[in-house]
Amino acid sequence: MKTIKLLCFFLWATTLYSQEVLIVDFEGFKPHLEKNNDTTYVINFWATWCIPCIKELPEFEKINQKFRNNKFKMLLVSLDFKPQIDSKLLPFIKKNDIKSEVILLSDPNSNEWINKVNNDWTGSIPATVIYNNDYYYFREGSMTFDELNEIITKNLKK
């Protein structure tokens, strides 16, 4: 009987976090910066320990919901620490009902890959890249719903 209860507990616990988080190094992440099609991509770099990041995430979630039926893709790139994925990142995603795709960029060579994302990036977060095959935008610092909406609306492929 204890075995059945224990098995039920583990099955229940594994369903607590419906969102999976892929863990990648920069080489695994890099293809997300190089898509060449008619989709507009928003890539936001953030972490659960970054107060401005946490403040702006609801704005990104609203944008994701607004444009989800368009040629649009939102990717939230967490820079949290890999050992804290189960204790911090996954509970944060669940608690805040994050629907956007989340990946964990776990690559200690940030001095090498930060400038590969954008030459002007100092490494501060939040940071956002918005692009499609005709447009590129980079911003270090927070963004509002209105700022995101304006950029995406102007550059969304119909």
Image: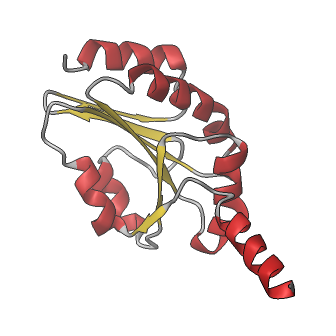
Tell me residue 47's x, y (percent): 60, 52
- In the rendered view, tell whether residue 30 sits above or below residue 142: below
Tell me residue 152's x, y (percent): 34, 20
Looking at the picture, the colour scheme in use is secondary structure
Tell me residue 17's x, y (percent): 64, 57
Q: Is residue 65 left or right of residue 121?
A: right
Q: Is residue 1 left or right of residue 110?
A: right
Q: Of 51 and 23, which appears nearest the observer?
A: 23
Q: Is residue 25 left or right of residue 33?
A: right
Residue, x 27% and y 58% (percent of image)? 30
Task: Specify the farthest residue to the front.
Answer: 1
Residue, x 75% and y 72% (percent of image)? 8
Q: Quadrant for residue 155, please give it.
A: top left
Q: Is residue 76 left or right of residue 155?
A: right
Quadrant including the N terminus: bottom right
Quadrant including the C terminus: top left
Q: Of 125 and 62, which appears nearest the observer?
A: 62
* Count of numbered circles in the view: 0
Residue, x 73% and y 45% (percent of image)? 95
Tell me residue 34's x, y (percent): 19, 49
- In the rendered view, tell whether residue 98 sits above or below residue 10: above
Q: Quadrant for residue 109, please give it.
A: bottom left
